[in-house]
Image (cartoon, rainbow, N blue to C red):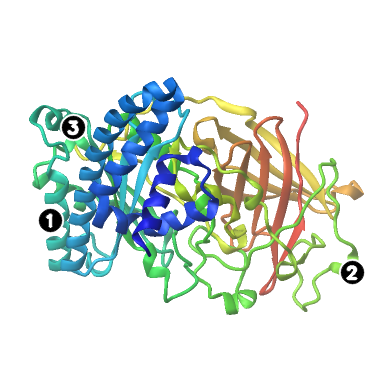
Amino acid sequence: MHRSFRLTALSCAFLTAAGCSSQQMQDLQESVNSVGKDYGMAVLCGVGVVGGAAAGYALKGKDGVLAGVAVGGALGCALGYVWQSRLQELDRIAKEENLKIQTEQLTVAEGAIATAVPKEAGLVTQIEDTGMFATDSAELTESGKRAVSKLAEMYAKPKATDQQAAAKEAKERRLLVVGHSDATGNAEYNQKLSERRAKTVGKVLVAAGIPASSIYYQGAGASRPIADNSDVFVRGQNRRVEIVELANDQALVMRTQAEAGNTKYLQYGTSTVPKASVAAAPTIKSPASTSAPAATQSSTSSTTVASTSSSAKPASKASPAVDFAGKPTDAYNWSMAQKIKPKNSGFELVSSAHANEMPMASCEADMPRSAGEVLSMADDKPLQRHATKDYLPGYNNRVWANTVNGHLVTVSPVSILRESAQVDRQPILQVVENYDQNTKNRAQTIKAVANTYEGESEVLYRVFARDAKASVSCMDLVFSKGNAKVTEGALFYAAGSDAYVATYVPIPATK
């Protein structure tokens, strides 16, 4: 890419008011690391001058231009030196140790409520695990020890050049180490293993001289995929170690909250079933098993679910445990998550403008996800946050129910906290067959586990049956955060080896 275009794109990142197109912003995401590596000092000095001049002119007209140039130039040069040095060091280590390393700058968005967090909040570094750890072990290989030791030495060096600033940085800076796995094997085992691996890396950072009180670690397991788990050739990209260098405690909390239930991780499911054979795979799942393809359809907001006609019943010889008169999943267009506007995390990312254009998978291509808590290297205690038991309005352990093809389906309690829309209490599903015929059938009780993904005004509530023989495999419900209402819903179930889906829009039971 031509250097002058790089300068233009980088200027756009700092001067969003300049009117850069979304395509330029997208191109910037692809080239920003090489720019910082090769030209970070010079480019950011220039951008600082331009940005300072623009800001000065906006505030004081022509009289503010010179002052803005001085302030912006100094700030831009300082940021450029830090940025360039970090990326050059990472690039050197990657080449020496044959590592795949990706970086992303965390910048606080304009208007974000983060008064104690500087604009340049941190740097995210993803290191793909290509032989870093022994198989099924949290022990670093010889090459892994060497690579992580080099990374630790880099992070141990202060970014600030003068002694006073370096001391302030050392006191306030926080490092978050996150272990990630692919979705093969048991989900709980993967989460615990990824946590132990993250702690192993944390120990190397401590050995390099970084205070244990400044380091936190987390095992995310397979909950945050960045590649297709059903493709054996790319799923290895999910096995990675993430090191996030953050300005202070508040930036650490912001990052932790931004990653919890982030809709961007719905782009890939956690099914390991190849897409070519997914239709023939068993579809009812437990926390350690998974299956089939993405699906959904629009639903109405009426109190009765519109079922498909009897002609849409499963055509295969196998019969479902309960006939919900649904459609085959391969004839169903699931698009719920794309309609959810991602929640503002407080960080400003180049790719955020395209976040809701990503293809995403339904619960049938997923399985329950579990990320461990963020723990301190100093005492293994969870990160202190001002968490509360406040619920989103209308989601304080209520019962939600409706009929599907005459069968009553209940999910309760629906329990969603205000903070990151986390699930407080796990739900139980109940199915009463032929409820519309006033039968005395007993309710089938199905233990379940729910995951949530929070948008600006809606929450995707994803429920999985724990019993592989249950009459319901999983369900996706989109809850409105404003008026305690399901705007869209889909219920998935199996008939033999085939997967089916029916519209399901429950309503809250009256007290």
The residue at the point 34 percent across, 33 percent down is 251
Q: Earlier in the sequence, mark 3 or mark 2?
A: 3
Locate residue 366: give its quadrant: bottom right
Q: Is residue 379 visible?
A: no
**Which is more foreground, mark 3 or mark 2?**
3
Q: Which mark is drawn over residue 411?
A: none
Locate residue 293: give its quadrant: bottom right
Question: Which amino acid type is shown beneath numbered disc 2?
Answer: Ser
Q: Which residue is mark 2?
A: 311
Q: What is the CA distance from the residue labelled 3 to the residue labelled 1?
A: 21 Å
Q: In this picture, is 165 found above or below 96? A: above
The residue at the point 19 percent across, 67 percent down is 95
Image coords of residue 461 (percent x, y):
61, 45
The residue at the point 49 percent across, 41 percent down is 18
The residue at the point 27 percent across, 34 percent down is 75
**Which is more foreground, mark 1 or mark 2?**
1
Q: In this orientation, which residue lies closer to the viewer: 146 or 54?
A: 54
Q: What is the CA distance from the residue labelled 1 to the residue labelled 2?
A: 64 Å
Q: Is the Cβ of the residue at disc 3 closer than 8 Å to that at disc 2?
A: no
Q: Quadrant of the C terminus?
A: top right
> Taking 448 as reference, is 33 left or right?
left
Image coords of residue 458 (percent x, y):
64, 39
Q: In this picture, is 323 found above or below 434? A: below
> Taking 88 as reference, is 428 left or right?
right
Question: Which amino acid type is shown beneath numbered disc 1?
Answer: Ser
Q: What is the CA distance from the residue labelled 3 to the residue labelled 2?
A: 68 Å
In the picture as drawn, the residue positioned furthest to the front comes out as 62
> Taking 224 as reference, is 152 left or right?
left
Question: In terms of secondary structure, where does tag 3 sit?
Answer: helix
Q: Which mark is drawn over residue 169?
A: 3
